[in-house]
Amino acid sequence: MESLVTFVEIMLINVLLSGDNAVVIAMASQNLPAHQRRRAIWWGAFAAIALRCALTLAAVALLRVPYLQAAGSVMLYAIAVQLLLDSSTHAEGPKIRKSATLASAVRTIVAADFVMSLDNVLAIAAVADGEPVLIVLGIVLSIPLIIWGSKLVGSLLHRLPQLVFAGAGLLGFAAGKMLVHDPGLRPLFAGLPAASEAIPVLSIPLVIVIYLLWRRA
C-alpha cells in the first residue's frame, strides 16, 4: 500500500514538472519549419529522459548538496530570458525570427532539460526515498507526458506567438522555486516564509523585465 501511494505521488510530480520540459521544448523549436520542429520535439524529449536516467544515479547524493539547486535556478533564469530574446517583438505582436536551426534548438532544449530534469529527479528521489525501482518507474512514466505536452504547447505557440511570454514566466516561476528550496539556502528562507512564497511569483515578471532591459540596452 505504501508503495502504491509513493507511485501515485511520483505520477503527480511528473505531471507537474514535465510541463516545464514540454514548454521549453515547444518554445525552443517554434522557429523551425514543421518537419524540423517535429524532429526537435522528439530529440528534446529523448534528451530529457536520458538526462533524468543519468541524474538518477546520483539523485540521493544530490539531495544533500548545498547550492546545487540555486546554481540550477540561475541557469534556468538565463534560459528563460534567452528564449524571449529569440523572438523579435513588433508593434503587432511578437514575430519569430527564421534564423533558428535544428541544432541550435536541440542545444537550447538540452541545456534547459538538464536544469529541469535535475529538479524533477530530485523531487522524485525525495518522494521515493532513494528506491531505485520507483525512481526509474517515475522517469519512464514521464516520456509520454513530455512528448504529448511538447506537441500541444508547440501547436499553441505557433498559433499564438504571444504565449512565449507566458512560457518564459513559467520557467521563471520554476527557477524561483528551485532557488528557495535549495538546502544551502534553507536556513536563510526559514526565517523569511513570506520571501519563500514571494520569490517564485516575482520571478514571473522578473524574466520579462530582464528581457526588456536587455533589448533596450
Image (spheres, helix red, strand yellow):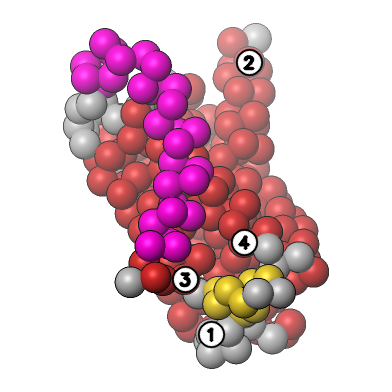
Magenta run includes residue 142:
no
Q: In terms of sequence position, does the residue under pointer 3 or pointer 2 come before the other?
A: 2
Query: How far separated are the C-alphas under marks 4 and 1?
Result: 16 Å
Secondary element under disc 1, as helix, strand or loop, is loop
Q: Amino acid at mark 1?
A: Ala
**Nearest to viewer (mark 3 / mark 2):** 3
Q: Nearer the viewer, residue 145 or 99?
A: 99
**Nearest to viewer (mark 2 / mark 1):** 1
Where residue 51 appears, x then y in whole percent? 43, 55
Q: Are marks 4 and 3 in contact (CB under 8 Å)?
A: no
Where residue 70 appears, x then y in whole percent? 28, 39
Query: How far separated are the C-alphas under marks 1 and 3?
Result: 12 Å
Q: Are marks 4 and 1 in contact (CB under 8 Å)?
A: no
Secondary element under disc 3, as helix, strand or loop, is helix
Where residue 52 appears, x then y in whole percent? 45, 49
Q: Residues within 10 Å of mark 4 (few under 14, many from 20)?
A: many
**Nearest to viewer (mark 4 / mark 1):** 4
Disc 1 target residue:
100
Q: In terms of sequence position, does the residue under pointer 4 or pointer 2 come before the other?
A: 2
Disc 4 target residue:
164
Where residue 91 appears, x then y in whole percent? 65, 74
Q: Amino acid at mark 3?
A: Leu
Span highlighted in magenta in the image: 186-213
Q: Is residue 81 left or right of residue 90?
A: left
Q: Total number of numbered labels?
A: 4
Disc 3 target residue:
85
**Residue 69 seen in the figure:** yes
Q: In terms of sequence position, does the residue under pointer 4 or pointer 3 come before the other?
A: 3
Q: Amino acid at mark 4?
A: Val
Query: How far separated are the C-alphas under marks 3 and 2?
Result: 42 Å
Main SS, magenta region, reads helix
